[in-house]
Amino acid sequence: MLVMGELPARRKWCDTRALDLLISVGTGVGCRGMEGRCLYVILLMALYWCTEALPLAVTALLPIVLFPFLGILPSNKVCPQYFLDTNFLFLSGLIMASAIEEWNLHRRIALRVLMLVGVQPARLILGMMLTTSFLSMWLSNTASTAMMLPIANAILKSLFGEKDTSKDMNRENEENQASLQQNKLYTVPTEMQFLASTEDKDLTEEKEVASDVLSDLKKEEEYKTNIWKGFLISIPYAASIGGTATLTGTAPNLILLGQLKSYFPECDVVNFGSWFMFAFPLMLIFLLLGWLWISILYGGINLRGWRTKKSNIRVDAEARAREVIKEDYQKLGPTKFAEQAIFFFFCMFAIMLFSRDPKFIPGWASLFAPGFISDAVTGITIVIILFFFPSQKPSFRWWFDLKAPNTETQPLLTWRKAQETVPWNIILLLGGGFAMAKGCEESGLSVWIGGRLHPLEGVPPPVAVILITIVIALFTEFASNTATIIIFLPVLAELAIRLKVNPLYLMIPGTIGCSYAFMLPVSTPPNSIAFSSGHLMVKDMARTGLLMNLMGVLLLSLAMNTWAKSIFQLGTFPAWANIHAENATSLSTAVENVTLSALNKI
């Protein structure tokens, strides 16, 4: 991500001319009155988010100031959007991730998986991708990438620790070959001088052997470079893919949930369990195809040489890598009580979220009053326990022996640690998105946008899904994922109503498409972290990410037209969308009347 000090050129956009342009866009295209003012705020925030002229979280606070001053929404309706139950669900996931990182449970899981999959390059890449994607389901994509890259570098150094040595051997052989070409014979030790009188045929054979050795070394060097790139590029890709599998995995998923509650309050088909049933199979399929593509492209899988015998150099390198992984795992020591406790609560966190209301069977939330228990209640209940559960195995001696020492034990997670590690700015960013969505709804801007989508009403819904995913995947290559989905979701909701299809049929592909940013280092923070290692080039990410984007679009379209239809009832236009359409119609009439009366006064 870029910082403010690096953006003097982009800040020039945010001058008076840019603001005048935004005003003209809001008023010159027929959008006047309250919806025009709301459009101005949204375009201003979109400009700041795309250029990062202000920090993303600060830009997200603008609705608190601009909506009341411009008469769009009163502050008592804007401010609560920053602390919806969706924000607390995300907060519970961040706190759980902080506890996992505190006790190195994520590192133990990662090394254990790598020990199980093996040390052949293709298997190691698969192990890296599986581990990173699993961690990214619960931790942030950035944290998962930052944690896995040091492990990958340690393994790569053990595999290719003789890289510099091989370069020296390569250089020495080149010098020997140059000497051979100049003098037509080798420089040999005294006791070997009889070779100088051999026949020309023997000399030719020696030249061929030297040339073969040099060629083999060059191929080995190219192989090492490709494998290194394959390792590094697979980690951020797996983090982006893995984050789509759970509602708490990445911010765009939660923004979808929050905006659904704002636009369609009666919609209750999207929760942690239903999302997991839809997105987890999609994630697994995409991960497997992505692994095959990266392994084939960077030499981890050689389609022409399945039966080719490994060289001794590669066998030794794999043995060293195996020892490095084993040594790092042994350094963690035996499993601590705190790690066992964190793992237990982590499993409880996932199981309770999944089983609260899985839709296909009654969940445990049905034991309570309908509508009282949400995913946020479940998540916060578990993470509160982390702040008082002991990190060391408790002793109950003092219950029976009053003279036994009663020492205070540290909890699994302290509030100071949570303050330091939880990215609180993301909570504000989510709130800004929800406030923007509320402003679009209350001002009538969403209705106005829907009225401008007539040309798209003839597009078949499956084609619309593909087009939407492509457009958003391309847009998010240059803009923040969170900002992208905040901008596009209101448009997709109105487009779905115009097409008379289930709004989820368009909003879910748009949400997941935001995470499919693979082509540029600046597309996502994980991409930037991997690129900063210095071993990747922009063209490496571009050629690898292009096919990854294409695969993601096609797989997402397949998922939406197959198993997603039964999970989210996408085959019908739901009643909760009908209610919104009726309200939008009445709101549109009211907005037109207010606008006309305002114009008459002018």
Image: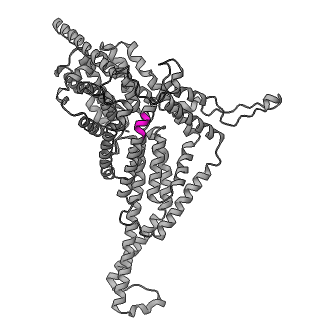
User: Residue placed at 19% from the left, 28% from the top?
Assistant: 457
Position of residue 173 measured from the top left corner of the image (x, y, whole percent):
40, 75
User: Residue placed at 35% from the left, 53% from the top?
Assistant: 293
Magenta-tinted stretch: 275-280
Q: Is residue 497 above or below residue 158?
A: above
The answer to which of 357 and 444 lies nearer the viewer is 357
**Quadrant position of residue 254:** top left
Q: Is residue 524 above or below residue 449?
A: below
Q: Is residue 595 above or below residue 324?
A: above
Give the side of residue 14 with respect to residue 535, left or right: left
The answer to which of 192 and 221 lies nearer the viewer is 221
Give the side of residue 391 with respect to residue 480, left or right: right
Query: Can residue 115 be seen?
Result: yes
Residue ranking furthest to the top: 601
**Quadrant position of residue 185:** bottom left
Position of residue 602 measured from the top left corner of the image (x, y, whole percent):
16, 8
Q: Is residue 546 above or below residue 246?
A: below
